[in-house]
Each structure stands twice: as C-alpha cells, then as structure tokens.
C-alpha cells in the first residue's frame, strides 16, 4: 500500500543530477520522470521550479498510511524520527501531526488520519488530500523560523517558506 519505491516525494524517488543546479543545465544530466510515475512510482530527477517572491507550503509525511507494526512503541524499533532540511531556506512549521498512540503503553495504533488517498485510483498515493477537505489546526501566529526539523514516524509536517 503506497510508497512502494521507498522514500519518495509524490511517488518519485530522487536520482541526483550529475552537477549542481546552479551550473548550466546542459551539465545536469537529469533522468526524466515518466507519465507512469504517479501510478507506479519511479526513480528520476524530480526538479521543480518554484515561483519567485512567493510563499510556498509543503506537507512532508512519514508513511502515515502503514509501515507501522502494531505494538511498535512510538519512536523505537526502527520507526524513528527522520531529520529534514531544506538547503538554503528557513521555514515555519505550521502543523505537526502524530500517529495514533496508546497513551498508556506508547504503542502505535495507527498512522495519522489527517491525510488520506483514493486507494482504488491512486495506488501509490501520489495525490493525497486532507480527510476533512482542508487543513485544520494550522498555526500562523506563533511559528518559529527553523532550518531543520525531525519528521515524526507515522506523522506529518506542514511548513512554509518564502522563495526570494
């Protein structure tokens, strides 16, 4: 169920360019993403051009649809938090959401339910959506400006940054 190719963004597992992106594009030697990526998952050089002088929001999930073993203690047994960093950007964490955890034992009972997929039509979950129709519980007022954060196992983060 989902994430069949391992760590990925929108079902695309990154193959790094041969040269830094600030050099001429002819030196990059990118591996193009095919149309099948969203249905099957793929390995490619997924490079996105972001609009200048805009605020960008993104959601980073840590296998919230499965991948946990029932009875795993939160933050242990290989289901650890993973550090994330956006090179060259400081960002604001607008939301942190955790898996469903037994408050007494600390065992994971299930992944976070804020986001879901249409599993019949989207087997790799490349088009997840908010279960309630829109994001809830976003904090725009008291957010710290960060350079990195730890993605919680079976949880998600929503963050924003300015592309200037």
Image (cartoon, helix red, strand yellow):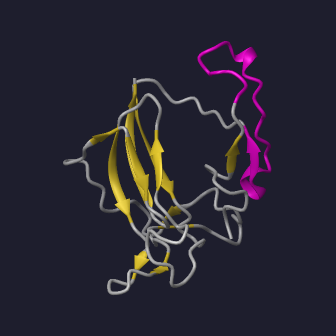
The reply, left or right, for residue 97 in relation to residue 67 is: left
In the image, farthest residue toward the bottom: 104
The reply, left or right, for residue 11 in relation to residue 111 is: right
> Which residue appears at 40% of the width and 79% of the height?
101
Residue 140 position in % (x across, y down): 25, 48
Residue 124 position in % (x across, y down): 69, 62
12 and 122: which is toward the camera: 12
> Which residue appears at 64% of the width and 51% of the height?
8
Give the residues in magenta: 17-44
For the N terminus, give its image quadrant.
bottom right
> Which residue appears at 19% of the width and 48% of the height?
142
> Which residue appears at 52% of the width and 30% of the height?
50
79 and 57: which is toward the camera: 79
Residue 33 position in % (x across, y down): 76, 40
The reply, left or right, for residue 116 in relation to residue 6 is: left
Residue 24 position in % (x across, y down): 67, 12
| Vertical comparison of 84 with 121: above or below | above
The reply, left or right, for residue 40 in relation to residue 85 is: right
> Does the magenta stretch mainly form a helix, a strand or a loop?
loop
């Amino acid at each position: 169920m989902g994430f069949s190719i391992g760590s990925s963004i929108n079902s695309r597992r990154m193959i790094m360019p041969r040269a830094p992106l600030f050099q001429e594009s002819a030196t990059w030697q990118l591996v193009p993403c095919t149309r099948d990526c969203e249905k099957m998952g793929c390995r490619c050089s997924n490079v996105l051009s972001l609009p200048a002088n805009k605020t960008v929001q993104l959601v980073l999930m840590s296998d919230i649809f499965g991948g946990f073993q029932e009875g795993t203690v939160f933050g242990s047994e290989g289901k650890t938090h993973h550090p994330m960093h956006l090179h060259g950007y400081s960002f604001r964490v607008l939301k942190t959401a955790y898996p469903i955890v037994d408050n007494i034992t600390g065992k994971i009972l299930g992944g976070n339910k804020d986001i879901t997929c249409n599993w019949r039509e989207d087997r790799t979950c490349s088009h997840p959506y908010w279960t309630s129709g829109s994001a809830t519980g976003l904090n725009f007022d008291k957010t710290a400006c960060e350079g990195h954060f730890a993605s919680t196992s079976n949880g998600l983060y929503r963050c924003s940054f300015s592309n200037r």
